[in-house]
Image (tube, rainbow, N blue to C red):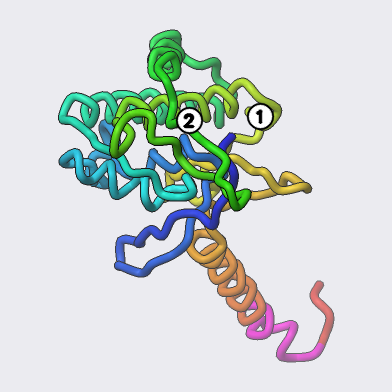
């Protein structure tokens, strides 16, 4: 998988920003929208939107990319395959042959070319002119998916435990007990609900006849 970064900044339905780190580059593509119920989150409306996503992803440094309409359509198709593959994996189902084929097709093309800079940093080669293409970007994303779904963390691909959240992530933590897409969002909401439930239970117990009389319950 591609080296880790700090994740994406998403917004709740109420407009509150929170940070979400799905753990891999290929899963970072999913929050940009998708088929069916994910369509309302669509942000890849034009080629420039995919360029913006690449700059905000964990790819470092941000690559200079030129994207065509055909490559944008290919990005949406790859994203749909990755959605299905990730959800299937999270629920213990085998990937669908057509989704595996879509990932392999994208991965068969040359990826973004990397190079080692003189200062020891990591950069992108300029072998394809002023910038790379959308096909190079999608190949890089697909190869990351191959590393994820064909690697040691495949069994840790999970769907957020919140009932009203469908974000998918890979748990790369050492204990392997991550449940939430983000502690800022769903994890915090779970804590608040659990605390409220305990307080309500405590209040009900304090208001019972036995508790008021000070006698043990019978």
Q: Tell whether position 93 is magenta.
A: no
Residue 30's quadrant in the figure? top left
Q: Which of 55 and 152 lies nearest the eye of the viewer?
A: 55
Q: Is residue 128 above or below residue 11?
A: above
CA distance for labels 2 and 1: 12 Å
Tell me which secondary structure the magenta stretch mostly adopts.
Answer: helix
Horizontal relation, residue 124 to residue 199: left or right: left
Crowd class of label 2 (few under 14; some 14 to 19; many from 20; radius 10 Å): some
Horizontal relation, residue 23 to residue 215: left or right: left
Residue 205 x, y percent position in the rendering: 68, 78
Judge whether residue 163 can be spotted in this image: no
Q: In which quarter of the image is the N terminus?
A: top right
Residue 84 x, y percent position in the rendering: 41, 25
Q: Which of 153 and 207 lies nearest the eye of the viewer?
A: 153
Residue at figure coordinates x 55%, y 19% from the top left = 93
Q: Is residue 113 above or below residue 118?
A: above
Q: Mark 2 points at which residue?
A: 87
Residue at figure coordinates x 24%, y 37% from the top left = 66
Crowd class of label 1 (few under 14; some 14 to 19; many from 20; radius 10 Å): some
Tell me which segment is drawn in magenta. 204-214
Residue 116 x, y percent position in the rendering: 57, 40
Tell me the tag on residue 155.
1
């Amino acid at each position: 998988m591609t080296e880790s970064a700090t994740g994406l900044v998403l917004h709740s339905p109420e407009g509150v920003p929170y940070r979400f780190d799905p753990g891999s580059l290929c899963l970072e593509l999913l929050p940009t929208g998708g088929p069916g119920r994910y369509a309302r989150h669509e942000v890849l409306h034009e080629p420039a939107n995919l360029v913006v996503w690449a700059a905000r992803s964990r790819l470092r440094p941000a690559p200079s990319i030129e994207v065509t309409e055909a490559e944008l359509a290919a990005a949406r198709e790859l994203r749909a395959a990755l959605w299905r593959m990730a959800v299937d994996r999270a629920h213990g189902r085998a990937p669908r042959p057509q989704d595996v084929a879509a990932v392999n097709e994208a991965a068969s093309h040359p990826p973004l070319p990397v190079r080692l800079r003189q200062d020891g940093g990591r950069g992108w080669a300029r072998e394809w002119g002023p910038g790379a293409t959308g096909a190079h970007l999608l190949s890089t994303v697909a190869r990351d998916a191959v590393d994820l779904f064909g690697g040691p963390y495949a069994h840790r691909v999970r769907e957020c435990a919140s009932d009203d959240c469908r974000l998918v992530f890979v748990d790369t933590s050492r204990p392997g007990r991550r449940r939430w897409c983000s502690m800022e969002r769903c994890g915090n909401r779970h804590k608040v609900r659990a605390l409220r439930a305990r307080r309500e239970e405590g209040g009900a117990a304090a208001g019972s006849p036995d508790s008021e009389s000070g006698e043990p319950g019978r």
